[in-house]
Amino acid sequence: MRAIIVIAVIVLVLVVVGWIRFSSPNGDPTIQVDTDKVRQDTSVIVEKSKEAVDSAAQTIDRAAEDVDDSIDSEPVAQ
């Protein structure tokens, strides 16, 4: 039962974002998948993901440099 609900929710989300359309021209029910929209949306998601990963990597690099700068590299004289 859970699997049916999960599948129904996934199909509903795909309909809402416009990737799937249901129609019945001439009384024949059809399901249309807008592959161009899927391709366009996924490429946008990939680009934004790359930007987010690059931004996170730069933030980590800056934080690592700050830590390195804050560490005293000279031994403490006793």
Image (tube, rainbow, N blue to C red):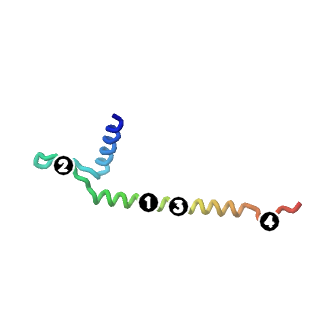
Label located before the other in sequence (2 or 3): 2
The residues bearing labels 2 and 4 have C-alpha atoms spaced at a distance of 74 Å
Relative to 31, say whether 76 is above or below. Answer: below
Amino acid at circle 1: Lys
Amino acid at circle 3: Ser
Q: Going 40% across and 58% down the picture, which residue do you hit?
A: 45
Q: Callout 1 environment at 10 Å: few (<14), some (14 to 19), or many (20+)?
A: few
Q: Going 63% across and 60% down the picture, which residue do you hit?
A: 63
The residues bearing labels 4 and 1 have C-alpha atoms spaced at a distance of 43 Å
The residues bearing labels 2 and 3 have C-alpha atoms spaced at a distance of 43 Å
**Which of labels 3 and 4 is toward the front?**
4
Which residue is denoted by mark 1 in the rendering? 48
- Outermost top residue: 1
The residues bearing labels 1 and 2 have C-alpha atoms spaced at a distance of 33 Å
Say which element carries label 2: strand
In the foreground, 39 or 17: 39
Q: Callout 2 environment at 10 Å: few (<14), some (14 to 19), or many (20+)?
A: few
Which residue is denoted by mark 4 in the rendering? 74
Q: Position of residue 57 (x, y in %)?
A: 55, 61
CB within 8 Å, label 1 to label 2: no
Q: Position of residue 10 (x, y in %)?
A: 33, 44
Label located before the other in sequence (3 or 4): 3
**Label placed on residue 30:** 2
Q: Going 34% across and 38% down the picture, which residue do you hit?
A: 3
Q: Position of residue 75 (x, y in %)?
A: 82, 63
Which residue is denoted by mark 3 in the rendering? 55
59 left or right of 66?
A: left
Amino acid at circle 4: Glu
